[in-house]
Image (tube, rainbow, N blue to C red):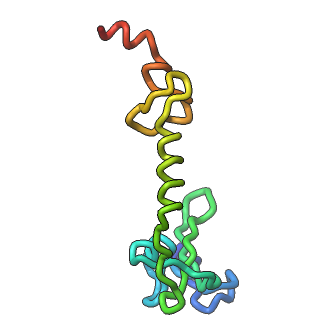
Amino acid sequence: MSYSYAKCFDPNGARHGIPTFPWRCAPDGMATRRQLRARGMRPGGQPVAGQVLRPRYRRGPLVAYLYRLDCAKPVRPMTPAKRAALDKANTARRTCPKCRTDAGYVIPLSLGMCVPCAYPDDEQRAA
C-alpha cells in the first residue's frame, strides 16, 4: 500500500472526521453529486456520508463528497416557469451588449461582447 493511498484511506473517520476513501474507491451504496445526477437523483437534504480524496503534488487534495444512495431523492421535475427563466438567462448570455444581436454562442466574459464587435479590424481584413 503506497503512502498516498494510506493517507486517503480512513473508512472509520478517525483521521478526517468522516469516512474517507481513495479516489475511485468509494464503497457501493455511495455516490457523488454528479453520479447522483447521472442517475436522476439528488442528495435531498441528507448529510455528507463520506468523502473521496485524490492527493496532489504540492497542493491540497481534491475532495468529492459522498452521499448515500438509499437516502437520495429523485430530481425535481422542470416546471414551465423554471424553463422560461432558464431560456431567458441563456438568451441574455448570447446577446451582445454592443450590437444587441444574438451571437449564436455564449459570449466570453473575457471579451464582454461578440467577436466581430471586439475585433472590428479583423472583419475588414477578411473581406
The residue lying toward the viewer, choosing from 20 and 105, is: 105
Query: Where residue 67 sits: x, y (%)?
Result: 54, 83
Q: Is residue 102 above or below residue 89?
A: above
At horizontal 48% and vertical 76% (from top left) the residue drawn is 75
At horizontal 43% and vertical 89% (from top left) the residue drawn is 28
Is residue 103 at least partly visible in the picture? yes
Q: Is residue 32 above or below residue 93?
A: below
Query: Where residue 36 sits: x, y (%)?
Result: 46, 77
The residue lying toward the viewer, choosing from 79 and 120, is: 79
The residue lying toward the viewer, choosing from 68 and 55, is: 68
Query: Where residue 100 sits: x, y (%)?
Result: 50, 27
Tell which residue pokes out farthest to the left in this image.
Answer: 127
Which quadrant of the figure contains the C terminus? top left
At horizontal 57% and vertical 78% (from top left) the residue drawn is 51
Q: Is residue 87 above or below residue 97?
A: below
Q: Quadrant of residue 101?
A: top left
Q: Quadrant of residue 14?
A: bottom right
At horizontal 59% and vertical 65% (from top left) the residue drawn is 61
